[in-house]
Amino acid sequence: MPIIVNLDVMMAKRKMSLNELSEKVDLTLSNLSILKTGKAKAIRFSTLEAICKVLNCQPADILEYVKT
């Protein structure tokens, strides 16, 4: 898939665990895990906004397009 999810990179930069992010964003661990591993097929803008707010980053810091 040409869209790469760099959520784990941003979490590491912010020294935040999946559990902590899950609580702050109010998403289940399983949903965040699916997103983090790149297995998600879609993401709501409200979810992306919440993640960006908590991690203090931009959507482009989390999602990356790689030409195949």
Image (cartoon, helix red, strand yellow):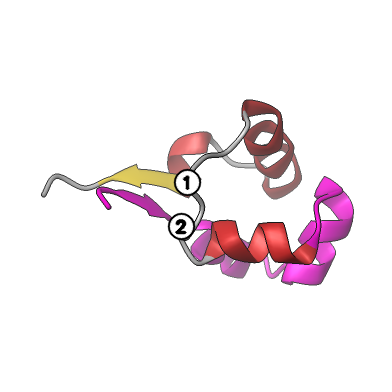
Mark carried by residue 67:
none
Spatial CA distance of label 1 from label 2 is 15 Å
Percent across and percent down for residue 5 are 44, 54
The structure residue drawn at horizontal position 47% and vertical position 60%, both measured from the top left corner, is 39
Q: Which residue is mark 2?
A: 6
Answer whether residue 5 is magenta in the image.
Answer: yes
Q: Choose mark 1 or mark 2, whichever is in front.
A: 1
**In-image side of 31 versus 22 (left or right):** left
Identify whether 49 is placed above or below 1: above
> Outermost residue, left direction?
68
Kind of residue at badge 1: Lys
Q: Is there a contact, CB below 8 Å, between mark 1 and mark 2?
A: no
Percent across and percent down for residue 46 are 70, 29
User: In which quarter of the view is residue 30 placed?
Assistant: bottom right
**Which of the two labelled residues, at mark 1 and mark 2, occupies the earlier sequence position?**
2
Percent across and percent down for residue 6 are 46, 57
Percent across and percent down for residue 67 are 14, 44
**In-image side of 61 versus 67 (left or right):** right
Kind of residue at badge 2: Asn
Part of the protein shown in magenta: 1-28
User: In which quarter of the view is residue 51 placed?
Assistant: top right
Q: Which residue is mark 1?
A: 41
